[in-house]
Amino acid sequence: MKANKNKRKFNISEIKKNILKLDTSYTHERKIQFLLDIRGYLIINKVRGSYIEFGSFLSEMQVAAFHILSKTNSISNFFGIDIFKKFQGFNSSYEKVQKDLKKISTKLKIIKLDLSKKKNLTKLDHSINISVIDCNEKRSLINSLEYSIKNIVSGGIIYIDDYFVLDQDNLMLKSSLKKFINKYNKKSEFFKTYPPFGLAIIILDK
C-alpha cells in the first residue's frame, strides 16, 4: 500500500496498541453489532414480528435487543428461551431473570423450555422476525433452527452464534440449514458474518 511504502521499520508498541483497540473487550460485542446492523433493514423493509432468543441465559442480549430495536417499531415482543438450570457450567435462575426483566418492560418475556426436546417447541406459537440462536448443545441448536425457519416471516433474519463450528470435517449446522430451508419451502440470502463463529442470514418465502 502507498501509505506503507516509505516505512523502514515497525513499532512494536504501535502494533500492541492497535491490537488492543481492535480486540473484543465485551463478550457480546458481535451480537450487539448484529442488532445495530439490522435496524435500518427492519425499518425500510417493514419486517415485523417477535424477537426470539434461543439460549437466553441471563437475558443480557435480550435486553440489549429491546433497547436497540424498540425504536424501529418492528418488534411486538422480546422473548428469551432457556432451560434455566445448571447445565455445562451455565446456571441462571428463572425467577431472578424474570424479576429483572419486569423492571425494564412488559415486552420482555422469558420461557422455561428444554430445547433439546423437539416436542417442547410445539408449545411455542409466535411469528418471528428476528431469531437469535445461541445454544450450547447440538440438538438444541438444530431444533431451534428448524423452529425458526418454519415460523419466521418472509424477510426475517436468523443470527446463529455458533454457525462456523466444525463437526468432524463439516460445519455443524450447514446440512440442517439446507434441509430445513427446503423442507419449509424457503430461500436464504447471506447478510453478514460475525467472527469468530456467527452468521446472519435473511429467510424469504419462495
Image: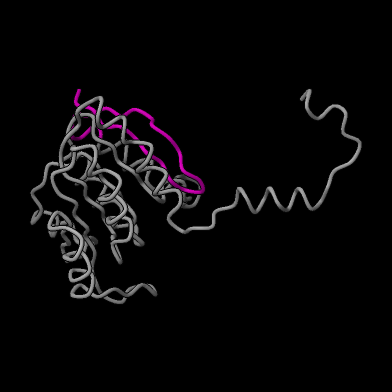
Q: Is residue 100 magenta?
A: no
In which quarter of the view is residue 73 placed? top left
Residue at image coords 28%, 56% = 63
Q: Is residue 147 left or right of residue 190?
A: left
Name the one closer to the observer, 169 or 122. 122
Residues rendered magenta in the picture = 181-206
| Number of marks present in the image shown | 0
Residue at image coords 22%, 75% = 96
Residue at image coords 24%, 42% = 130
Q: Is residue 199 above or below residue 83?
A: above
Q: Is residue 94 left or right of residue 2?
A: left
Which quadrant: the N terminus?
top right
In which quarter of the view is residue 156 placed? top left
Residue 40, position as x, y percentages in the image? 31, 30
Residue at image coords 36%, 46% = 160
Q: Is residue 201 magenta?
A: yes
Asked which colour scheme the image uses, the reply is one colour
Q: Main secondary structure of the magenta part?
A: strand
Q: Is residue 161 above or below residue 46?
A: below
Residue 13, position as x, y percentages in the image? 79, 53
Residue 21, position as x, y percentages in the image? 62, 50
Residue 46, position as x, y percentages in the image? 19, 28
Which quadrant: the C terminus?
top left
Q: Is residue 181 above or below residue 141?
A: above
